[in-house]
Image (cartoon, rainbow, N blue to C red):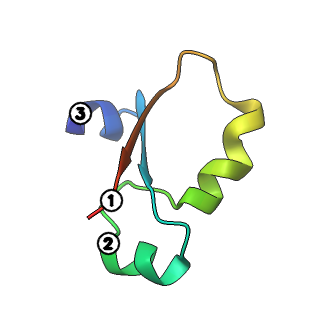
Amino acid sequence: MIEKIMNEAALLVCAYDDDDKFKDYHLGGAISLNEFRSKTDGMEKDQEIIFYCA
């Protein structure tokens, strides 16, 4: 999984809608849920997405 994220084959998304929680639970290579939402229109249909929350 880590290799996929580092190679940008998978997108790691922190599933919190709150920016403060994103800052508290941010993992390296992850994007916020708000950033993910802004990217969905241009995303490939087969893009692997990994959501996480603590």
Q: Which residue is mark 1?
A: 53
Could you say where residue 7 lies in the image, as x and y percent from the top left? 36, 33
* Distance between the alpha carbons at the discs numbered 2 and 1: 8 Å
- What is the three-letter code of the residue carrying label 2? Tyr
Amino acid type for the residue under numbered disc 3: Glu
Q: Tag 3's secondary structure?
A: helix
The residue under the point 22% across, 33% down is 1
Q: How far from the left and from the top, in percent, is residue 39?
A: 69, 44
Q: Foreground mark, 3 or 1?
A: 1
Q: For mark 3, does the 10 Å Cα neighbourhood hold few (<14), some (14 to 19), or many (20 or more) residues? A: few
Instruction: Quickly name the residue at label 3.
Output: 3
Q: Measuring 32% from the left and 40% from the top, which residue is drawn there?
A: 6
On the image, numbered disc 2 is attached to which residue?
25
Q: Which mark is residue 24?
A: none
Q: Report if the CB atoms under discs 2 and 1 are less than 8 Å apart.
A: yes
Image coordinates of residue 12 in percent, x first then y, are 40, 46
Foreground mark, 2 or 1, reads 1
Who comes first in sequence, dot 3 or dot 1? 3
Residue beneath the point at 62% across and 17% down: 45
Of the image marks 2 and 1, the number of the one nearer the N terminus: 2
